[in-house]
Structure formats: structure tokens, C-alpha cells
Image (cartoon, helix red, strand yellow):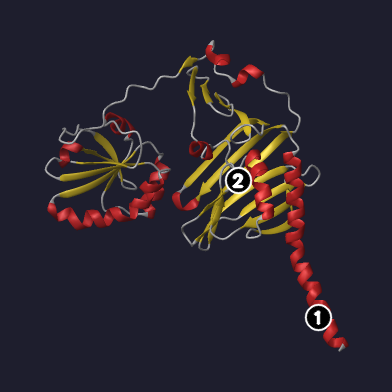
Amino acid sequence: MRSLFAVLFLSILFSSAAQQPANKATAVLKSVSQRLNSLSAVSYSYIREMKYYADNYDSRDTADIYMEFKKDLPLGVRFQAARKKDLYVYNGRNTFDLDASAMTIDSATPSSDRLLSNSFLYNSMVMLRNNLPMLIANDSFSKVLTDTLVNGKSLFSIRMEAPMVYLNAVNGIGRMDNPSLRRPYFLLVDKKTYLPYQFVSKLVNGNDDRDYIRVTYSGVKTNPAARASGSWTYAFYQATYKAYEEPAQIPVIATGARMPDFRLPVYNGSVMDTLSFNELKDKVVLVEFWFKSCGPCIKAMPKYNALQDKYKDQGFELVTVNLEDPVEDLDFFYKKYPPHYRMLYHGLALFNSLGFDGCPSSVLV
């Protein structure tokens, strides 16, 4: 009997120990949430790094952020984001995009969907402030606490993940429709202040866990000097900045119109060559415009060879035209999807002359 009691006792002990990381993680998350929700304003600098290995996508962005939390605003926040040559202001209803190079100001009243994709809000302090209470209460999110060391700084690291779920930019969760994808999150927290130090969103596809978005917060001030009240209004900037005017829109090339001639370089990995459209005048030509950050463009690439091979003996030719990515990026896709067609580049001027304003765009001639 004592042996059975010992087994039961050890089983309970180990079960309790296994649950401790989740309990401790929740306790730390509650402390972070309480800290953020106690603030009326915060300022910080961030570095946002995005890396998607499969698509050879790599970007780095920095900005200085000032946020005021107000319950009467749609998102509970208004903010100003400053970069070297521009300032972006969201006053809770309208946005002002100020370009210091052109000395222009562009005003808009964004929809809620548009705000959810705002890059300054993605993985921001307000996203954490709004989402942490939901994450704490949602038992479908696993939560594991560990200690970590970053640049000699001792931090809490909390791993959070729920099946088929991702966090929205500002608040709430969305559902993923691809069962092979997972979205684990890692929140690194300063042990002394319980303020966020870093937030990492990973995208795991099968066994490939290299892709990530990482935001690092620095210079965090929890009692920053308030911005001038006028700086939240359009009138404040009118004396210095002129209203932005959309450039005259070139009409999209019409059905039945003559395709202008062009000559662009051909990328084939080594030999430099060019191609003129006049050289293809006796063929049916499909021109596909793309750039490396265009997800649908990259998704279509594996299908181009099949299309070219199927119709090449019937006078058909497919050519792709990259807008302005560097040759190193072309080389990546050239090797990943070895083309049976010609891959042209430096095509931005041609793209603009045809009246297009987004990719993917195509012309069948």
C-alpha cells in the first residue's frame, strides 16, 4: 500500500511540476498586461526584422513611436511614428503621412481593416496591451516560460501557440486555413520592469521554422513628454507641408491597343543578353510582371514552365518582367524555379507606361 501511495504521490508531484511552466508563464503575462494597461502613454524605438527564406525576402525597418492610450478611440490608441524622412500620425480617426523630402502631407480616414494591416501597429505595444488579456484567458494557447539571455540581459521568454490561430495586428485572433502552417509567438520580457523587450512571430511550414518577424523595443519610456495638442491635427502641418497630389494616372493599356516596343535585359544566370518586343511580333506573347515581395507572383512561378512547354509549339511565348529587384534576388528565383521562358528585368518604366499600379499584372499580346 505504501508503495502504491508513493507512486501516486510521485505521479501528482511530476504532473504539478509539468504544469508549472504554464502557470508561471501566465503569471508573467499577467504582470506584463497589468504593467501595459497601467500606462496612459508610452514611447519607444523599434527595430522590425522580417525574414522569409523560401521567398528570399528580408527587410528591416526602424521607427520612433509615441502612443497615447484612450478608451474613447476606436482602437484605444493614437500614435505618432517618426522615421528619418517621414512622420506618420494617427489621431484615432484620421491619418497624416508627412514626407519630409517632398514636403507633402497625405491625409486619409482609414477603414478598420486598413488599420489592422498598419505596419506601425503590427507587433506593437498596443497589440500586446490589447491581446494579452485574451491570451491569458484563452486555454487553447499553450504557454511555456523559460529564462534567456540577450546581449547580456536576463529576460523571461514566453512561448505561446494555439492550433490554426494567429494574432491580429491590433486585437483579436484570426484563423489559418492551411493545416501545415503554425504560428508560435515568443514574448521576451524585462525581469525588472515587466515591459516587453522583444516579440517574435514565427511561421512554421511543416518542419521549416526559419521564417520570422521580430520586433525589438528599446528606449522604452512609460511617462514620456506629451506631444503638442495641435500635432494631432491636419491644420498643425499646413503651414509647412503642401497637400499631396496623386500623379496623373496613365490609363491601363486597352484591349486591342498596340503593345509598345521595349528592349530589356534578359537574366539567364551568366550571359548578358537583351530582348526586344519586336523580336516576338509573330508570336502570341504573355507578359507577366512581378517583384519578389508579391506573394501571388511567387506562388505562380512553378506553373510558368508547364504553360510555356504546353503551348510553345503553337507560336506561344511567355516572358516574365521583374520590376526593380536587384540581380541577386533574380538569381535566387532563377535557381529555385529554373525557367523554360525568358526572365527580363529592369521593367518598372515599362510597367508604369502600361498604366499598371500593382502586381501581379499581365498582358496577352
State which quarter of the image contains the C terminus: top left
- Front residue of 70/250: it is 70
> Given the current orientation, which residue lies at the most extreme front position?
72
Tell me where residue 106 appears, x and y as whole percent: 48, 22
Tell me where residue 262 appears, x and y as whole percent: 23, 33
Residue at image point 60% right, 56% down: 184
Whether residue 155 can be seen here: no
> Given the current orientation, which residue lies at the most extreme left position?
282
Q: How would you rate the neighbour count of disc 1 (Cα within 10 Å): few for under 14, some for 14-19, many for 20 or more?
A: few
State which quarter of the image contains the N terminus: bottom right
Residue at image point 47% right, 46% down: 57
In this view, 89 is above or below 197: above
> In the image, what residue type sits under mark 2?
Arg
> In the image, what residue type sits under mark 1?
Leu
Label 1: which secondary element: helix
Mark 1 or mark 2, which has the lower sequence index? Answer: 1
In this view, 125 is above or below 90: below
Label 2: which secondary element: strand
Q: How would you rate the neighbour count of disc 2 (Cα within 10 Å): few for under 14, some for 14-19, many for 20 or more?
A: many
Tell me where residue 351 appears, x and y as whole percent: 30, 34
Label for residue 116?
A: none
> Given the current orientation, which residue lies at the most extreme top position?
239
Q: Is residue 288 left or right of residue 129?
A: left
In this view, 53 is above or below 241: below
Do the residues under discs 1 and 2 have CB atoms within 8 angstroms? no
Q: Is residue 236 left or right of residue 346?
A: right
> Given the current orientation, which residue lies at the most extreme right position?
2
Per the model, the C-alpha gap separating discs 1 and 2 is: 44 Å
Label for residue 214?
A: 2
Residue underneath mark 1: 8
Whether residue 102 can be seen here: yes
